[in-house]
């Protein structure tokens, strides 16, 4: 079977750490073009993941306009997600864009509009949905096991793990710090589990309290306070139109021992669930409090079919099948749009001190 020809825009950390290895393991893709503003990075990616005939570019427009390319991966800093994705879709390419969808709600909304106008597939890299615990909990939620989920917490808390590479600390390039970087994963998981994408209002606080400290104890080495132009932590309170509420917490640096990342806690009328110590579902059964901890480590079907249970592998397979077989996306652009809208509102509320209300 002929492999799908794809192009990669952005050959930095997220490309090499996540997408490129998973694309290679998938085996159904052929990367025919690599693009990066740093030509050496693109050439290095070509050597490891491309073919002798793969092209290297420094201008994304050259790549997206290649006729033989079916899909484009947008793996650049947040600032350029929207216009690269839009250019690719207008050139007739399907798009896998890394999270978050865009820096702003307006940019993300334009991406959704262009996807509809062009008929191109657009999905966002929220790979935590494909984890075994996430998939199990999603089935439980869909089955109504938790009942009505009316309160949730979205966890993205690091104690001292500020990323000191790339442009993570640059507000202009990224649009923010831990909230838009890892908070986006936790919020996405929570909204998806609740199947609730209708926010009514957002209140939030955004902090930059530890960025100036000299004794940092950072897991990734010392950061430069002069380059640390984003928040070090942020807290959001989201009220949904149906009355449900979500507490969102995100930090790269926070004096806490309660460290959780890309996790959610859910409280429903029939049961609750969290990912604090593996996946735990709590309920009252036979008039007694009990906790269920499913064994998610069994090989099961994956062992017999030879299919990978790796979340990034499933992400690539889902994208491929959506393009070639017309199967449903797991992450739709409309869902990712709501995540971006809420994140933007937390930042706005943090700056103004006022609650942000939606129409």
Image (cartoon, rainbow, N blue to C red):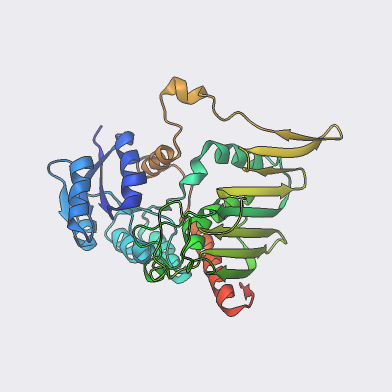
Question: Which quadrant holds residue 78?
Answer: bottom left
Seen from the viewer's position, the closer of residues 53 and 167 is 167
Task: Place residue 204 in its image quadrant.
Answer: bottom right
Badge count: 0
Above or below: residue 332 compared with residue 321: below
Along the line of sight, the residue nearer the viewer: 156 or 75: 156
- In the picture, the quarter occupied by the N terminus is top left
Q: Name the residue furthest top.
A: 304
Task: Name the one closer to the observer, 325 or 248.
Answer: 248
* Residue at the extreme left of the image, as rendered: 53
Q: Position of residue 144 (x, y in %)?
A: 70, 42
What residue sits 34% from the left and 65% below the top? Answer: 80
Residue at image location 43% in from the left, 38% down from the top = 314
**Residue toward you, 316 or 77:** 77
Above or below 170: residue 121: above
Question: Which residue does the image show at 47% across and 44% down from the upper left?
Answer: 328
Residue depicted at x 52% and y 23%: 300
Q: Is residue 65 left or right of residue 220?
A: left
Query: Where does the image place residue 16, in percent across and percent down from the top left?
Result: 31, 46
Q: Is residue 146 left or right of residue 136?
A: right
């Amino acid at each position: 079977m002929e492999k799908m020809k794809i192009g990669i825009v952005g050959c930095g950390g997220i490309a090499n750490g996540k997408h490129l290895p998973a694309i290679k393991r998938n085996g159904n893709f052929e990367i025919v073009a690599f693009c990066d503003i740093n030509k050496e990075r693109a050439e290095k990616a070509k050597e490891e993941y491309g073919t002798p005939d793969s092209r290297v570019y420094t201008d994304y427009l050259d790549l997206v306009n290649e006729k033989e390319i079916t899909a484009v991966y947008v793996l650049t800093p947040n600032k350029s997600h929207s216009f690269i994705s839009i250019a690719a879709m207008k050139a007739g390419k399907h798009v896998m864009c890394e999270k978050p969808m865009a820096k702003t709600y307006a940019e993300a909304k334009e991406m959704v509009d262009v996807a509809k106008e062009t008929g191109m597939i657009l999905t966002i890299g929220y790979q935590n949905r494909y984890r075994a615990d996430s998939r199990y909990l999603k089935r439980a939620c869909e089955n109504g096991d938790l009942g009505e989920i009316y309160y949730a917490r979205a966890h993205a808390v690091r104690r001292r793990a500020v990323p000191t590479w790339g442009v993570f600390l640059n507000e202009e390039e990224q649009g923010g710090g831990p909230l838009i970087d890892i908070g986006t994963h936790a919020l996405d998981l929570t909204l998806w589990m609740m199947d609730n994408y209708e926010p009514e209002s957002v209140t939030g606080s955004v902090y930059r309290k530890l960025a100036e400290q000299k004794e940092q104890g950072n897991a990734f080495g010392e950061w430069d306070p002069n380059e640390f132009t984003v928040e070090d932590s942020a807290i959001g309170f989201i009220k949904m139109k149906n009355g449900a509420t979500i507490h969102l917490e995100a930090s790269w640096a926070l004096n806490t021992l309660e460290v959780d990342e890309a996790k959610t806690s859910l409280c429903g009328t029939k049961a609750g669930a969290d990912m604090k110590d593996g996946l735990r579902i709590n309920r009252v059964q036979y008039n007694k409090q009990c906790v269920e901890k499913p064994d998610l480590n069994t090989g099961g079907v994956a062992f017999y079919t030879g299919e990978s249970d790796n979340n990034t592998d499933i992400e690539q397979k889902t994208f491929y099948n959506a393009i070639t077989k017309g199967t449903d996306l797991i992450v739709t652009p409309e869902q990712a749009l709501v995540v971006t809208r809420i994140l933007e509102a937390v930042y706005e509320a943090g700056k103004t001190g006022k609650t942000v209300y939606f129409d």
